[in-house]
Structures are given as structure tokens and as C-alpha cells.
Amino acid sequence: MTTQTGGDEKTQLQYLNDERAIIWALYEYAHSFDYGPEKRFRDCFTSTGSTEKRWRGEFESKHRNHESLTPGPWKPHEGSKHIVHVPMVLSIDGDTASTEAYWTYLVEGGNNPHLQSFGRYIDQLKKGSDGRWRIDERIIDVEARTLARQEKTVKK
């Protein structure tokens, strides 16, 4: 496993390059979720990429294939913004990595934007043969959401 400290300069430089590319992959997901296009969003995942959604640690749903994932509305000036912040690269081991990051989802409510939900992503990423890092497994751990959002989720 590569860590931030130790190793020769080449190893340290590779770690920093991978770390930057991994963080970019997390940001790319948020941007493509809100703005699209769909191909850009889907390319954030490996071909076997999956997501699991949890409400305060309890299982809610799972998408086993990146093709079944539901991206955002892709209407930049209508309604919502998805923000990924405080990303942490926990480990890089060759072509695999583990990360955690906070996320916040804002929605428009009349003339006033408001917080709809927040939580954290717990991710496993893989580096593809093209050198690009992609999400292979994502846990969406929802820690809080508005009452209206909670009721909508329960009715599903």
C-alpha cells in the first residue's frame, strides 16, 4: 500500500499524482450528476460499478450496475446542486483506492435554496487501463434529510 510518507521520490510523486486524480474523480461525479451529460456521468464508474444507499447506516437500496444508476436532472439553472467536500484518500494500493467524502444536496424551494440532505460517500475506486480512476463501489450514507425527503423515501 502506498502512503503519503516514505518511499523514494518516484513513489511519492506517483502517490501525489494518483491522489489528485482520485479526488478529481470524486468531483467529476458531482459535476456530471448535476450538469451531465449522461455519458460523462456513467464514465465516473467502472463497468461493474455499484452503489448502495444507507439511511444512518441501515441498508435502503443497491444498484449493482452503473447503467441502472440515476443521475441528476441536468438542468443547471433549475433546482438542485450536489456538493462533494472534504475528500480523504484513505489508501492507494496499486490500481485500487479507498476514499471517504462528505456530500451536501441543495434544492430550490421557491426563491430560497435549502438543504435537502447530507451524508458521506464511502468509495472503492479502480484505475482503468486508460489510467483514469473510477468508482467501483460506492456507499451513499445519508445522515440527514428533510422530512419531505424522508416521507418520499418511505413510500417507495
Image (cartoon, rainbow, N blue to C red):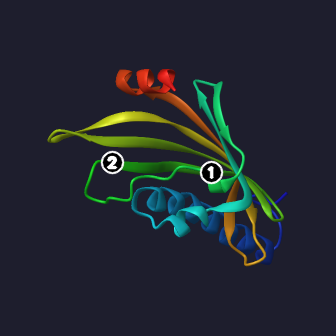
Label 1 or label 2, whichever lies nearer to me, is 1
- Where residue 104 appears, as percent x and y from the top left, is 43, 41
In terms of image quadrants, where is residue 3? bottom right
- Vertical placement of 120 versus 148: above or below? below
At 41% from the left edge and 49% from the top edge, which residue is drawn? 82
Instruction: Tell me residue 114's x, y (percent).
Output: 27, 36
Q: Is residue 154 above or below residue 95?
A: above
Kind of residue sitting beneath label 2: Ser
Q: CA distance from mark 1 to mark 2?
A: 21 Å
Q: Residue at (33%, 48%) from the top-left corner? A: 80
Report if residue 4 is visible in the image.
no
**Above or below 144: residue 21:** below
Which residue matches tag 1? 68
Q: Residues within 10 Å of mark 1 (few under 14, many from 20)?
A: few
Q: Residue at x 68, y 66 (%)?
A: 133
Left or right: 70 in relation to 139:
left
Q: Nearer the viewer, residue 90 or 57?
A: 57
Closer to the chain start, of discs 1 and 2, is 1
Circle 2: is it few (<14), some (14-19), or many (20+) Cα within 10 Å?
A: many
Report x, y in % for residue 128: 75, 71
**In this figure, which residue is indicated by the disc labeled 2?**
80
* Residue placed most toward the observer, 11 or 142: 142
Instruction: Please identify the quarter of the rendering in which residue 135 is found.
Output: bottom right
Relative to 150, is 6 on the left or the right?
right
Image point 41% across, 56% down: which residue? 34
* Residue 115 visible in the current orientation: yes
